[in-house]
Image (cartoon, rainbow, N blue to C red):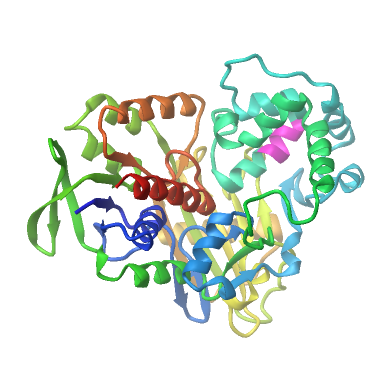
């Protein structure tokens, strides 16, 4: 066997599919009974509910290229126009997030003094060289305390469910650091970048014949499970479920893997091994091989998340406006936010029903995730009533709990990644992949997986 991919989440599936599409000998081993990892869609009682990620932004060429290769391009579904509006719960109620600088100046998202402080960003300076700054420190320096606590914290909550005081700005929002480095001011950098983009001739700015990207919030007809099913079908019998890798050893001719599959043990040989598994699983496989490398990987923290879906029969509660809302940690609420799933993607419900997808837990309140299903449903109902005025009784509920939900790229993450990359150089043919390392989103996993597969295909 030339290449063995361990882990059947989105990263492992993309890597295995791309390798095989390039004619490389590859097998994928997944320890559970299903492929897809955290990505998956469940059809329940007239609702389509996502168990993990809900959507992606249609702006990543690698994702569109994958969809095209799987004949799914025609099944991409952009969010409804109503989803363009987003809300933040602050100062006692939901407030609309402005979509433009003029709208920001006229909005009530921040008090007047805080808005004036944001405009003062034009005069801020650069951070000292070599400092891995927290997102909070970066935000306070550029935007002020209030904008950081309300807007920046809300944005990161929707992506990382993290602690703004601990997250590394360079690891979580590298475009912001790039703007600062190149333009000093984020506002000036954004204006200059927009002007430069407009000045480009039509059709330029990418590789030859790039895929046409909408940039819209999107999913697939049938939910994200459609992508997983297509990848699984394309891989066929090259993807093995209920196949647990119990050990990885280095030999002169490559790698040996001890595999337990369907009650039997076997040994596989490979030139390359890709560990596309959560970091804690990778740690267990790496520890007998390289304790120092394993310790670095083990240091990557996760924020636990509970996803609580609440469905309401048609006519029992008004259809909510917009994509949903986020709750900054300073509000001291028990809900991280909620997605108006039936407004964003109306095809995900039948007959005018309403579906809320509520997020609970995160880095600041991991204790909440440990509650039982009834307690989590009660919590979500109480918070929806207090924050959004939802008083109806749901006729549908679904709770999905992720004890290791979202990797946390805290201060020191880039330094840790440099050390991990350096340690891997001691083990030719061993690779790490997944959302724990260089991007947590669906687009990140697909792009990074495709890049790794291309590098392996060129070498194998």
Q: Nearer the viewer, residue 230 or 363?
A: 230
Residue 259 position (above or below residue 17): above
Residue 369 placement, left or right of 91: left
Measuring from the top left, give residue 119's x and y in whole percent: 87, 31
Q: Is residue 47 left or right of residue 116?
A: left
The quarter of the picture where residue 401 lies is bottom left
Q: Is residue 412 magenta?
A: no
Q: Position of residue 373 (x, y in %)?
A: 42, 60
Q: Which residue is at the front of the view, 412 or 305?
A: 412
Above or below residue 8? Residue 231 is below
Q: Quadrant of residue 85?
A: bottom right
Residue beneath the point at 37% across and 59% down: 22
269 versus 114 height, above or below: below
Q: Main secondary structure of the magenta part?
A: helix
Instruction: Judge from the rendering whether residue 341 lies leftward or rightward of residue 421; answer left or right.
Output: right
Q: Which residues are magenta?
A: 146-152
Q: Give the residue drawn at x 71%, y 70%.
A: 80
Residue 73 visible in rendering: yes
């Amino acid at each position: 066997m030339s290449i063995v991919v361990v882990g059947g989440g989105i990263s492992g599936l993309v890597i295995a599919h791309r390798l095989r599409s390039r004619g490389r000998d590859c097998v994928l081993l997944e320890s559970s009974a299903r492929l897809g990892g955290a990505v998956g869609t469940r059809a329940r009682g007239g609702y389509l509910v996502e168990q993990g990620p809900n959507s992606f932004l249609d702006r990543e060429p690698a994702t569109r290229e994958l969809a095209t290769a799987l004949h799914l391009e025609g099944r991409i579904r952009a969010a409804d126009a109503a989803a363009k509006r987003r809300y933040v719960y602050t100062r006692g109620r939901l407030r609309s997030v402005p979509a433009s600088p003029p709208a920001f100046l006229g909005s009530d998202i921040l008090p007047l003094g805080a808005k004036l402080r944001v405009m003062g960003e034009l005069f801020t300076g650069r951070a000292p060289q070599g400092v891995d700054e927290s997102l909070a420190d970066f935000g306070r320096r550029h935007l002020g305390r209030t904008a950081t606590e309300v807007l920046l914290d809300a944005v990161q909550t929707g992506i990382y469910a993290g602690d703004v005081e601990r997250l590394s700005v360079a690891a979580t929002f590298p475009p912001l650091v790039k703007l600062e480095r190149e333009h000093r001011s984020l506002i000036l950098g954004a204006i200059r970048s927009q002007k430069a983009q407009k000045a480009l001739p039509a059709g330029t700015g990418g590789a030859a014949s790039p895929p046409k990207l909408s940039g819209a919030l999107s999913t697939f007809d049938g939910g994200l499970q459609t992508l997983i099913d297509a990848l699984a079908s394309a891989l066929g019998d090259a993807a093995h479920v209920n196949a647990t890798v119990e050990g990885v050893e280095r030999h002169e001719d490559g790698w040996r893997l001890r595999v337990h599959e369907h009650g039997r043990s076997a040994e596989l040989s490979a030139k390359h091994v890709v560990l596309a598994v959560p970091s804690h699983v990778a740690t267990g496989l790496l520890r007998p091989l390289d304790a120092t490398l394993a310790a670095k990987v083990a240091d990557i923290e996760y924020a636990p998340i509970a996803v609580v879906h609440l469905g309401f029969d048609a006519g029992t509660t008004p259809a909510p406006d917009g994509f949903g809302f986020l709750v900054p940690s300073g509000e001291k609420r028990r809900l991280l936010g909620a997605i108006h799933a039936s407004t964003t993607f109306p095809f995900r419900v039948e007959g005018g029903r309403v579906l809320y997808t509520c997020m609970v837990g995160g880095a600041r309140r991991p204790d909440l995730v440990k509650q039982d299903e009834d307690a989590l449903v009660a919590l979500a109902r109480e918070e929806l009533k207090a924050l959004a005025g939802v008083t109806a009784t749901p006729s549908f509920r679904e709770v999905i709990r992720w004890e290791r939900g979202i990797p946390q790229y805290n201060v020191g993450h880039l330094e840790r990644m440099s050390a991990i990359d350096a340690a891997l150089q001691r083990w030719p043919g061993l690779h790490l992949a997944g959302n724990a390392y260089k991007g947590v989103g669906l687009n990140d996993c697909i792009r990074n997986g495709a890049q790794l597969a291309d590098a392996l295909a060129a070498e194998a």
